């Protein structure tokens, strides 16, 4: 597969390490969230057949974490964003 | 032996003669021959045996679709089983032997199977061999396994090497026939980066096998001209002997280049084959079409071939397969073969044309509305039986029969993404569906355009479209005039009869087998394939799948497309495993990582051990030491008595800077680091989000906004990845910068009562306990050279870790040993390191197994609940916080002389060795020379409340059952006075 | 105060760097370059650019390298560069850079984290296509990228059409060197 | 009709006219007591045991495609019970015991062949782990042996012993491990279930579930609504898709696992072997092909096909382990979709919806589990309580912190 890195352009997916569903960006706050909140965050997945937002790490590249939107049936890649930008857009900060 | 069947013409170099052997007999051929063409030229039709019935087999094709003519090419370690003689390029000195026969090809004992064919029907083995159960492995299966298989490997290591590589292009063109050459000319002339790959050693495809002209030249001459022009273009890469084996995602194709297979052996330093990963913007498949047979009784004899292949042997290789040749066809292309052969002086005894009407061939016995009912000839064809239109039958002597059931476009690669081709009635064949693989287009015969004119035109058109989509403009093409005969075919799949008519001639799948599958309700195409093994042979059914489908369609009364189609899978043709493995073999399987003291340790005769990619000193034998234990015991005792040195460079080091570095560490570690004083170290426990311990190590605060974190050797990479995730994704606004410095610093542990005395001799600063207390850290100098010092201990002794820039590591170990001479300093390896950490009760790899919590390790208090950190919440789940859960304990044998084994399980005294009595297991074991007996760590249920209990460590694998006592995991200096000394 | 000095060895383990000439290609180990990573502290890009300009340190764009009179640099990741300087004059490169950048940047010595090989000669793509998936032929001079060679994460810098620098992990210097030699011989 | 050597003899002499359908193609009835969604190995085994062992009737298996078209038809055919953890080992040992009597039980030769499996050891730590595992196996009534280097060499002299990057130091062996002809397992269970009156309905895709007041009433299908008292889902590879019809999110991701087969070769490798220092495992089929595989591709996928990096990684491992296969050729690759769970272990459990039961999350342990999975799922469906060997396979183990994590990789499915 080829991932079109927002900064570096097309790169072989082999340079990346896959983590999983981009919902992992939405980590609850440990001081307020319950075990069940963390259970749902850590363990439950939509696992769609179709468009899937997922986290890839450019380990053999510039070490950017990316959010790749990819069709899990065709492997077509629909969008690639820097995970840091997505995280900030989702309200994450410090 | 003379080349009795060699006729005039062809694209072989008759000025040179090549000598080769088949089954020990010598033959002659010419450059340009394949093994098959040369054997046929020498009058050899019998080249193999079929899989199940061991029926005689000769080639049916002249290309890579060949299911029958499989041989063992070469001998010794280079022996290559299942090699298709039809694509094996002839070279001087070639040797090959037939396979899957015993004792000889002409007399094969297992041909007895053919006599019992009525018992060995499709799937018969599913219905028997069940009694008694134990007989399967002992009796039936060994017989079956010996009989099965095709060619053999020698079990000798492949002596050749293989390369891999990466290529980039705008347009990849797969197949260099008329369509491919036309596409390549259009694309190449436009300046696009083009790769043109063809599996053959000569480009031109069918043009090399035909007699018709392009413009005013022979087809092959036009192809030569096109190739000449293309090779003059710097933006075009021509790759012959290169098979594009698979289409992968996003324009990536895998291709194998047979660099040296046409040589007796590769040139020194050169690979046998190279596997290329091709990155393409666009790809064009111009892979041509493959002819298919018509099934009739005993249609599998050597001498019975695809008509177009018979034509190819005559036109390209100057070979007449038989002295009397007949043709059986349901379409006009069969007639072309008859014409070509006759014009070459081959005696065409009859053309059996299943169609009524149509053009009548002049000067040839053209039997229209007729069928071939059967054939005769023991090891090769001698005659055929024909049923005339009027129903009369006639036996016609023939030593070669060309069969044409029509042509199947080579859609294979278009279905590599599991999409299905579509049926076209007008050519009675499947063609690629549209847009099945992104940016792949198909032209020429592969797309169902079966005329040469059509191939040239569509090749050009498809190339133009590809160029346009890349924003490139094509110059006008000047395509030569070429034959443009329409496809005239009246589908005819098999001739009805009561005996076996072969469909898959390698696996011996006959019309009868398909009927049986239908009778037993294995009617879906996948059931048909799996039950009869149709299309499972080495050719993936290139010549048999559609025929099999058609027969099943006839039985179910459904149309062929409704019956289904088979999805071809990569690779297009079988690829040597060596090529896919590349250079990753033997010592080069994975790279080595060498420590800064490696050179010195090698000089000292150290024994090394693999730790991931690292090689670390395991122990360092001294003269007179006979066992590894001698060395390890000495290293441990000397360290505890005076001082020992160990290269600990392999531990991961991560530089963490930024105004939020402390806050960041508080998030990623279970314990707190923001409160750590500058110039101090602290041990840290890192959890995964699921609350399990991920990693541990010490972190030093080198400045207000500057920390150096160490990880375990095993987790250096994953911890760094995780920290980047936390930094970029979870807390994107924290001011934190990370970089690994693992390799930048050569780091040595100096441990033992005399560690300070030794180090004071080499460092420039005062490191007295007052100046550099326990858990101190700082930048110092060594002979003026910048260095780092950390007062941390894994051994439990007074210990430091000192780091210098890596290029000085070699000098540093020598300097430390020199300075340590007066203290009898030793270097200790990973074994002694393990002994001392277990004596001290530190956890390591065997305890950090990914399923252990801080609580299990007795470090529960380290998980701060006052702050949010990764894993803090889920570490509180009920199943992980049970009071009677696993706890880290120390273990010692009650009898000091007794031996223990890591991996033994803990059982109470007197209970049965059953899972329900399993109380835990022994994780790490060492012999403690200090205590004079084995000591161990382990995880024990409710362990912290069982100190002092006597129980058993059982190792049922070795049948040992040893009485042990559960003790504290801290075997020495539990109060830690030594390290604070 | 001890009076001794520690003598360095190269990544390949010798007193002096190794040079191999294979066909048209020269593969030279380089031990005479000091390296430091320079990362912008949050929100301090402006300060870093000013300081960099002051010391003549180029800050190339993503995927690129640039050389100045004294300092050269190549891009590693957003707001982070690897700085190159002569080892002889700048062995303690971090000490040289810190005063210029103060607390605007995080600077880390990287000199001995890497082994450097310079590949010189015509038609370098033909050699490197066996080792790296980077499209060297298409890349402009000055291109710099992280790439994998024989399982090793390396930095590859195209200085000119006939000169390429490869930085690989120092502990694997011998494996990387072996891979370069073998590849050169097989495509010779 | 009963299969036997005698029967073949008789049919051969009478032109094979007597062979009947292996199974019927019935029209779906309006309702059933039990509907099993999924006509793969686990679904068919569940129906078979539900009818045979638990004496239940009015059972249908709904298959969206053809019987045995799931992972039972696209795996590397290995059976073994060399598991480490209490939650797993009793189950897989139960499964292995069922394999041992399977063919006589369902009167179909599935070629259950116990030629032994070895897991190679390359480090001392790996030997410690293998010792712990071997002991756990024996404690659970399975067989295990620890082989030293010489014993492995005697067994497979052609492995790379003398020039290996990671030396072979021994192996953990289970002699009762081996291989089974995978398609025959599906066909044997299908034929057996059909013979017991189970309706096997092919080309019948479940498109929805009818659930009222927390109880399931039946399923919507491409062939209309079919009512049921109890619905069991066994659709490896599609679990999340099907359970979404019930509004459930599962603790799993779907990943592609590639498998490979070489051209047919005369006997080379008798048993099953796994490389401990690379991603590679291999056996040789009775037909002669080397059947091998390695790691999953690692990204979520429903595509049933993989990519080059894993192909190359797997075969690199093969060449490193046994460089004598260099001149053998790769014939075919294919991909199966694995429901990779969050701890690498499966789920056989009730759901919060009354009458809806789930069986899935098999990662790539599914094939060897087929008989026990069917038996235990049938037990749960018939008795509403978990079978003794499957009681740990609960949904709530993640909430309670009772993961069954053989590899210790935590909540990252692609690492299991």
Image (spheres, coloured by chain):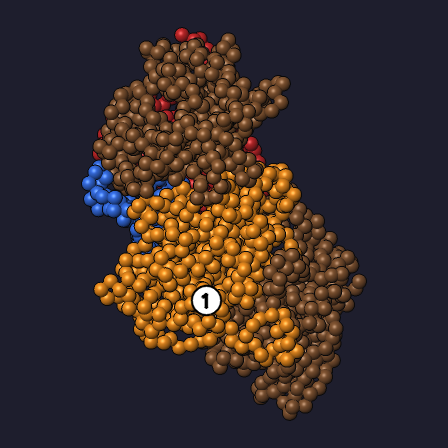
Chain colours: A blue, B brown, C red, D orange
Question: Residue at 35% across / 70% down in the picture?
Answer: D33
**Does residue D361 appear to the left or right of B826 in the view shown?**
left
Question: Residue at 70% across / 80% down in the picture?
Answer: B384
- Tell which residue pokes out farthest to the front in this image: B910
Q: Give the quarter of the figure containing the N terminus of chain B.
A: bottom right
| Position of D300 relative to B730 (above/below) | below
| Position of B724 relative to B111 (above/below) | above
Question: Residue at 52% across / 12% down in the picture?
Answer: B824
Query: Which quadrant of the figure has residue C52?
Result: top left
Residue D144, percent from left and from top: 55, 45
Question: Residue at 65% across / 43% down in the picture?
Answer: D154
Using the image as rendered, state which of residue D155 and residue C28 is in the foreground: D155
Q: Chain of mark 1?
A: D
| Position of B173 relative to C95 (above/below) | below
Q: Is residue B977 visible?
A: yes
Q: Secondary structure at mark 1?
A: helix
Q: Give the quarter of the figure containing the C terminus of chain B.
A: top left
Residue B593, percent from left and from top: 49, 32
Q: Which residue is mark 1?
A: D52
Residue B278, percent from left and from top: 47, 52
């Amino acid at each position: 597969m080829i991932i079109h890195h927002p900064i570096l352009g097309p790169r072989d997916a082999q340079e990346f390490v896959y983590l999983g569903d981009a919902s992992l960006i939405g980590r609850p706050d440990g001081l307020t969230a319950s075990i069940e909140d963390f259970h749902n965050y850590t363990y439950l997945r939509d696992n769609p057949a179709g468009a899937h937002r997922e986290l890839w790490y450019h380990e053999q590249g510039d070490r950017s974490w990316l959010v790749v939107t990819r069709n899990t049936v065709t492997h077509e890649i629909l969008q690639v964003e820097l995970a840091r930008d997505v995280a900030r857009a989702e309200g994450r900060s410090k | 032996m003379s080349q009795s069947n060699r006729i005039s013409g062809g694209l072989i170099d008759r000025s040179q003669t090549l000598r080769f052997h088949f089954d020990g007999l010598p033959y002659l051929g010419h450059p340009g021959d394949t093994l098959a063409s040369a054997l046929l030229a020498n009058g050899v039709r019998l080249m193999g045996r079929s899989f199940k019935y061991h029926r005689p087999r000769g080639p049916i094709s002249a290309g890579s679709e060949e299911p029958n003519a499989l041989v063992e090419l070469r001998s010794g370690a280079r022996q290559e089983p299942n090699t298709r003689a039809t694509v094996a390029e002839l070279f001087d000195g070639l040797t090959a032997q037939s396979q899957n026969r015993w004792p000889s090809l002409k007399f094969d004992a297992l041909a007895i199977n053919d006599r019992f064919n009525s018992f060995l029907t499709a799937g018969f083995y599913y219905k028997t061999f069940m009694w008694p159960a134990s007989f399967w492995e002992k009796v039936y299966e060994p017989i079956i396994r010996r009989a099965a298989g095709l060619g053999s490997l020698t079990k000798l290591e492949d002596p050749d090497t293989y390369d891999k590589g990466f290529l980039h292009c705008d347009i990849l063109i797969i197949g260099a026939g008329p369509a491919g050459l036309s596409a390549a000319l259009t694309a190449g002339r436009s300046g696009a980066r083009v790769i043109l790959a063809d599996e053959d050693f000569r480009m031109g495809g069918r043009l090399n096998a035909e007699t018709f002209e392009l413009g005013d030249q022979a087809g092959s001459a036009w192809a030569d001209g096109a190739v000449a022009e293309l090779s003059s273009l710097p933006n075009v890469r021509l790759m012959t002997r290169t098979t594009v084996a698979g289409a992968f995602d996003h324009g990536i194709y895998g291709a194998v280049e047979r660099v040296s297979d046409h040589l007796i052996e590769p040139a020194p330093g050169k690979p046998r084959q190279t596997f290329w990963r091709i990155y393409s913007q666009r790809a064009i498949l111009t892979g041509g079409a493959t002819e298919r047979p018509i099934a009739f009784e005993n249609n599998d004899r050597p001498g019975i071939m695809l008509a177009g292949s018979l034509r190819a042997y005559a036109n390209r290789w100057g070979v007449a397969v038989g002295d009397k040749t007949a043709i059986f066809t349901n379409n006009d292309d069969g007639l072309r073969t008859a014409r070509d052969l006759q014009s070459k002086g081959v005696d065409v005894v009859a053309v059996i044309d299943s169609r009524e009407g149509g053009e009548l061939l002049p000067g040839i016995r053209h039997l229209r509305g007729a069928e071939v009912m059967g054939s005769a000839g023991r090891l090769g064809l001698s005659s055929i039986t024909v049923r005339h239109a009027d129903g009369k039958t006639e036996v016609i002597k023939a030593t070669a029969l060309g069969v044409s059931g029509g042509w199947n476009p080579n859609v294979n690669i278009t279905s590599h993404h599991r999409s299905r081709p579509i049926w076209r009635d007008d050519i009675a064949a499947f063609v690629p569906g549209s847009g099945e693989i992104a940016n792949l287009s198909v032209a020429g015969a592969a797309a169902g355009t079966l005329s040469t004119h059509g191939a040239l035109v569509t090749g050009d058109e498809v190339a133009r479209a590809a160029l346009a989509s890349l924003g490139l403009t094509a110059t006008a093409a000047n395509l030569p005039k070429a034959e443009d005969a329409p496809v005239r075919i009246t589908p005819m799949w098999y001739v009805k009869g009561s005996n076996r008519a072969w469909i898959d001639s390698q696996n011996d799948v006959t019309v009868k087998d398909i009927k049986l599958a239908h009778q037993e309700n294995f009617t879906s195409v996948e059931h048909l394939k799996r039950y009869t093994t149709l299309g499972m042979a080495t050719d993936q059914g290139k010549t048999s799948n559609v025929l099999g489908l058609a027969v099943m369609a006839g039985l179910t009364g459904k149309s062929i497309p409704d019956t289904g189609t088979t999805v071809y899978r990569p690779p297009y043709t079988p690829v040597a495993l060596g090529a896919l493995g590349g250079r990753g073999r033997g010592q080069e399987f994975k790279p080595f990582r060498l420590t800064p003291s490696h050179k010195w340790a090698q000089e000292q005769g150290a024994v090394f051990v693999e730790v991931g990619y690292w090689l670390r000193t395991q122990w360092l034998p001294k003269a007179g030491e006979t066992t590894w234990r001698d060395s390890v015991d000495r290293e441990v005792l000397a360290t505890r008595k005076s001082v020992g040195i160990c290269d600990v460079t392999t531990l991961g080091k991560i530089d963490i800077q930024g105004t939020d570095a402390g806050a960041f560490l508080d998030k990623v570690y279970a314990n707190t680091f923001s409160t750590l004083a500058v110039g101090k170290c602290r041990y840290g426990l890192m959890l995964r989000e699921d609350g399990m311990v991920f990693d541990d190590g010490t972190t030093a605060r080198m400045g207000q906004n500057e920390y150096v974190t160490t990880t375990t050797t095993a987790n250096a990479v994953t911890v760094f990845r995780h920290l980047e995730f936390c930094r970029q994704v979870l807390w994107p606004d924290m001011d934190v910068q990370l970089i690994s410095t693992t390799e930048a610093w050569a780091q040595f542990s100096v441990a033992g009562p005399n560690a300070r005395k030794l180090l004071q001799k080499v460092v420039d600063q005062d490191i007295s306990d007052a100046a550099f207390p326990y858990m101190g850290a700082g930048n110092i100098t060594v002979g003026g050279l910048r260095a780092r010092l950390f007062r941390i201990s894994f051994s439990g002794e007074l210990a430091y870790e000192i780091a210098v820039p890596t290029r000085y590591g070699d000098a540093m170990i020598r300097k430390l040993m020199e300075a340590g001479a007066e203290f009898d300093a030793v270097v200790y390896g990973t074994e002694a390191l393990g002994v001392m950490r277990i004596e001290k009760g530190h956890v390591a790899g065997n305890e950090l197994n990914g399923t252990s919590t801080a609580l299990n390790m007795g470090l529960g208090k380290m998980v701060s609940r006052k702050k949010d950190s990764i894993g803090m919440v889920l570490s509180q789940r009920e199943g992980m916080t049970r009071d009677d859960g696993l706890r880290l304990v120390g273990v010692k044998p009650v009898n000091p002389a007794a031996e223990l084994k890591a991996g033994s399980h803990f059982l109470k005294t007197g209970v049965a060795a059953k899972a329900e009595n399993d109380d835990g297991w022994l994780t790490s074991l060492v012999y403690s020379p200090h205590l004079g007996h084995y000591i161990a760590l382990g995880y024990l249920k409710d362990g912290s409340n069982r100190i002092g209990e006597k129980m058993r460590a059982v190792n049922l694998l070795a049948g040992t059952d040893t009485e042990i006592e559960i003790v504290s995991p801290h075997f020495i200096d539990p109060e830690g006075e030594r390290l604070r000394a | 105060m001890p009076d001794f000095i520690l003598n360095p060895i190269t990544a390949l383990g010798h007193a002096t760097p190794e040079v191999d000439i294979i066909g048209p290609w020269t593969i030279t180990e380089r031990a005479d370059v000091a390296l430091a990573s320079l990362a912008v502290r949050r929100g301090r890009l402006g300060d870093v650019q000013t300081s960099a300009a002051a010391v003549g340190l180029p800050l190339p764009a993503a995927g690129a390298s640039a050389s100045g009179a004294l300092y050269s640099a190549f891009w590693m990741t957003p707001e982070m560069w690897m700085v190159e300087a002569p080892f002889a004059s700048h062995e303690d490169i971090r000490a040289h850079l810190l005063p210029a950048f103060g607390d605007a940047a995080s600077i880390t010595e990287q000199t001995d984290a890497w082994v450097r090989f310079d590949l010189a000669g015509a038609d370098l793509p033909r050699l490197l296509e066996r080792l790296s998936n980077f499209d060297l032929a298409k890349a402009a001079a000055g291109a710099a990228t992280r790439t994998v060679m024989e399982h090793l994460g390396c930095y590859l810098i195209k200085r000119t059409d006939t000169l390429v620098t490869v930085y690989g992990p120092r502990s694997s210097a011998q494996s990387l060197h072996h891979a370069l030699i073998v590849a050169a011989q097989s495509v010779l | 009709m009963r299969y036997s050597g005698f029967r073949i003899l008789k049919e051969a002499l009478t032109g094979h006219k007597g062979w009947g359908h292996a199974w019927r193609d019935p029209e779906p009835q309006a309702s059933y007591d039990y509907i099993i969604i999924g006509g793969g190995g686990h679904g068919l085994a569940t129906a078979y045991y539900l009818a045979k062992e638990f004496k239940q009737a009015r059972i249908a298996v709904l298959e969206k495609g053809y019987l045995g078209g799931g992972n039972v038809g696209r795996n590397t055919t290995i059976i073994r019970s060399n598991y480490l953890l209490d939650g797993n080992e009793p189950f897989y040992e139960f499964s292995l015991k069922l394999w041992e009597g399977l063919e006589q039980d369902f009167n179909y030769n599935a070629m259950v062949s116990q030629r032994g499996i070895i897991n190679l050891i390359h480090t001392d730590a790996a030997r410690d782990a293998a010792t712990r595992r071997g002991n756990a196996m024996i404690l659970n009534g399975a067989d295990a042996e620890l082989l030293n280097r010489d014993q492995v060499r005697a067994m497979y002299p052609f492995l790379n012993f003398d020039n290996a990057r990671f030396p072979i130091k021994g192996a953990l062996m289970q002699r009762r491990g081996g291989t089974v002809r995978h398609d025959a397992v599906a066909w044997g269970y299908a034929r057996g279930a059909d013979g017991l009156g189970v309706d096997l309905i092919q080309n019948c895709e479940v498109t929805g579930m009818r659930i009222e007041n927390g109880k399931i009433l039946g399923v919507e299908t491409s062939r209309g609504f079919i009512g049921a008292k109890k619905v069991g889902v066994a659709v490896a590879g599609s679990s999340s898709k099907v359970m979404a019809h019930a509004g459930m999110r599962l603790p799993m991701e779907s990943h592609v696992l590639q498998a490979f087969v070489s051209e047919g070769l005369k006997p080379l490798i008798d048993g099953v072997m796994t490389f401990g220092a690379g991603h590679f495992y291999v056996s040789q089929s009775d037909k002669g092909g080397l059947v091998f595989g390695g790691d999953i591709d690692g990204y979520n996928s429903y595509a049933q096909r993989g990519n080059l990096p894993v192909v190359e990684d797997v075969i690199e491992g093969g060449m490193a382990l046994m460089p004598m296969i260099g001149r053998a050729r790769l014939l075919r690759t294919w991909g199966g979709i694995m429901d990779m769970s969050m701890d690498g272990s499966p789920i056989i459990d009730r759901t919060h919806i009354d009458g809806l039961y789930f069986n899935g999350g098999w990662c790539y342990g599914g094939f060897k589990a087929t008989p026990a999975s069917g038996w235990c799922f049938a037990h749960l469906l018939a008795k509403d309580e978990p079978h003794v060997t499957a009681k740990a396979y609960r949904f709530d183990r993640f909430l309670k912190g009772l993961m069954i994590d053989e590899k210790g990789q935590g909540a990252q499915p692609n690492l299991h």
